[in-house]
Amino acid sequence: MEGRAGASSKWDIREKVWDHLESTGLAEFPRPVHRRIPNFKGSLQACSSIQELDVFSRAREVKVDPDKPLEGVRLAALQARKTLLVPTPRLRTGLFNRIVPPPGATKEVLRICATSQGVKDYSVPVGLDGRARVDLVVVGSVAVSEKGWRIGKGEGYADMEYAMMVSMGAVQEDTPVVTIVHDCQVVDIEEELLDDHDLTVDYILTPTRIIKTNCKRPKPQGIIWHKVSYDMLGKIPILKTLRSREKQMGKDVTLRDEHPHLANTTRAAALNKEMAENTQPQAATGSAQMGQHHVESDPLSPRLEGSGTITTVYVGNIPPSLRVSELKCALREFHVTPFRLNWQGAQHRAFLDYKDQVTAERAVTSLKGLSLGGNTLRVELAKSQRNKGQGEINSQK
């Protein structure tokens, strides 16, 4: 590749880079490099040059992606006794893990700590309130331009991670971003291909060069909620917690699926009906707060009682301070409002009845990992699927 992408889309550029790395023998394990942040011959050499950067020397806390070609940077950070943060895989359990080598670790042990296996064996999760203050961000790329425009593998995790770090106050506007690539991955990228959520880079390290991009394009200022889908919210539990926080701060957290011009009017009508069916007088909420069992149901469907078509979802680890209205609000936001809610606040649990199993299972996926009132909720299909009798309540203890 002669440094010109000459391609009309991000996918064209990705395919061209991946194909080139494979056809020229530059690709390294794991192979094939397609659909990955590609590892390449000379990646350790490129990584080691990070030690020449002042921004690395000054950094105390460094966030490095878990990709194979960035292994050398993770090792350099550990050897320099910096705090090393690595994003959790696909952000399933949180945002960061901190790599904690055993006391007196030899260079060989540090080398293992820098690998994907080491990330699993020597890491501790950092909670949202872990007060991470990241001084340097290192990301992988499929392609990057000398101006600092970056193209990842297309899943959006690096962009989302950065936006989440902004949201939780872990990075500032001037926190430098570095990427490590082979020389052939440095290509021309048209600026119109960039979206406002795309992360740009300040330094590019290759096996032969250190490029300072002097990129003036602003980095993402936080999570752009109108580009986030319910599907992404369901896959990334920590995103739900950040959204809840930002909503409390009065920010607009309307999701992509909720925008009027994108929403199907039938779906909107169905949602309004759901909300109307599940809005109860404040007196009912008050009684729930007193720890009494509190059941809300849809009066339009008495025929479902005991008919065997109900699927029940169990929600546990509910904090004592949580109000039933807050849970109902979360259910509405995820479009998983049950036709009946059995609130048992004193026992720190609730049961949600759904008319079909598909919605119930979607509720489990959407709510799993959601943090409300400081507790991560425990969400699963109830062991008994009908009649909230004593047997089921006992089975969930």
Image (cartoon, rainbow, N blue to C red):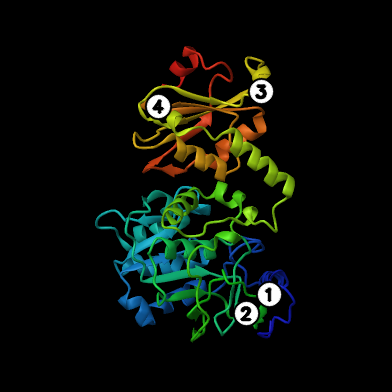
User: How far is disc 3 from disc 4 in space, using C-alphas?
Assistant: 24 Å
Query: Which residue carries the number 1 mark?
Result: 24
User: How far is disc 2 from disc 3 in space, using C-alphas?
Assistant: 64 Å
Within 10 Å of disc 1 (Cα), the crowding (few <14, some 14-19, many 20+) is few
Closest to the camera, between mark 1 and mark 3, is 3
The one nearer the camera, 260 or 14, is 260
User: How far is disc 4 from disc 2 in space, using C-alphas?
Assistant: 66 Å
Of callouts 2 and 1, which one flags the residue occurring earlier in the amino acid sequence? Answer: 1
324 relative to 236, above or below: above
Of callouts 4 and 1, which one flags the residue occurring earlier in the amino acid sequence? Answer: 1
Q: Are marks 4 and 2 in contact (CB under 8 Å)?
A: no
Label count reads 4
Closest to the camera, between mark 4 and mark 1, is 4
Looking at the rendered image, the quarter that the C terminus falls into is top left
Amino acid, disc 4: Ser
Q: Secondary structure at mark 2?
A: helix
Within 10 Å of disc 2 (Cα), the crowding (few <14, some 14-19, many 20+) is some
The one nearer the camera, 83 or 297, is 297
Query: Which residue carries the number 4 mark?
Result: 287
Residue 88 image position (x, y, % from top left):
46, 53
Amino acid, disc 1: Thr
Amino acid, disc 2: Cys
Residue 38 image position (x, y, % from top left):
59, 67
Q: Secondary structure at mark 1?
A: loop
Of callouts 3 and 4, which one flags the residue occurring earlier in the amino acid sequence? Answer: 4
Query: Which residue carries the number 2 mark?
Result: 184
Q: Are marks 2 and 1 in contact (CB under 8 Å)?
A: yes
Residue 301 badge: 3
Relative to 36, is 167 on the left or the right?
left
Residue lying at 39% horizontally and 68% vertically, measured from the top left: 171
Q: Are marks 3 and 4 in contact (CB under 8 Å)?
A: no
